Image: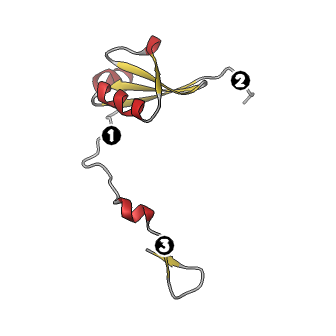
């Protein structure tokens, strides 16, 4: 593969509520390209060469015949577990939670 500096990447992601998704990512500091944003999709700018297309699920389905993955419950790990330092076990080189 040759190195092509003009290559652009667009990643498509299905979302249930486009407006809420845009508000969420805007609060994280992302901007949107309004030229490629409408009631079905929003173009979130990651950097100059990469954008994420947030697509309403019905619109996303027009791009594929595959099922959209649905989670049953959001994965939420307690913050105390993430911030906790691992404890050392009695054996050298091993750590335990």
> Is there any visible trace of residue 94 in the rendered image?
yes
Q: Residues within 10 Å of mark 3 (few under 14, many from 20)?
A: few
The kind of secondary structure element at disc 2 is loop
Q: Residue at x 47, y 24 (%)?
A: 31
User: Image quarter for residue 76?
Assistant: bottom left
Which numbered disc, 2 or 1, marks the residue that appears first in the sequence? 2
Q: On screen, 97 above or below 72? A: below
Judged by depth in the image, the label closer to the viewer, 2 or 1, is: 2
Mark 1–mark 3 Cα distance, whole angstroms, equals: 33 Å
Judged by depth in the image, the label closer to the viewer, 1 or 3, is: 3
User: Image quarter for residue 56?
Assistant: top left
- Judging by the rendered image, the residue that carries numbered circle 2 is 5
Mark 2–mark 1 Cα distance, whole angstroms, equals: 33 Å
Q: How is the image coloured?
A: secondary structure
Mark 2–mark 3 Cα distance, whole angstroms, equals: 43 Å
Instruction: Tell which residue pokes out farthest to the bottom in this image.
Output: 90
Which numbered disc, 2 or 3, marks the residue that appears first in the sequence? 2
- Judging by the rendered image, the residue that carries numbered circle 1 is 69
Q: Is residue 27 left or right of residue 95?
A: left
Judged by depth in the image, the label closer to the viewer, 2 or 3, is: 3
Foreground: 17 or 56? Answer: 17
- Judging by the rendered image, the residue that carries numbered circle 3 is 86
């Amino acid at each position: 593969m040759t190195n092509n500096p003009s290559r652009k990447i667009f990643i498509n992601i299905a979302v249930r509520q486009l407006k809420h998704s845009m508000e969420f990512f805007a609060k994280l500091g992302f901007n949107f390209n309004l030229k490629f944003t409408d009631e079905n999709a929003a173009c979130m700018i990651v950097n100059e060469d990469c954008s994420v297309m947030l697509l309403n699920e019905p619109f996303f389905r027009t791009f594929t015949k595959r099922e959209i993955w649905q989670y049953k419950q959001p994965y939420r790990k307690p913050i105390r577990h993430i911030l906790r330092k691992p404890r050392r076990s009695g054996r050298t080189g091993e750590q335990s939670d």
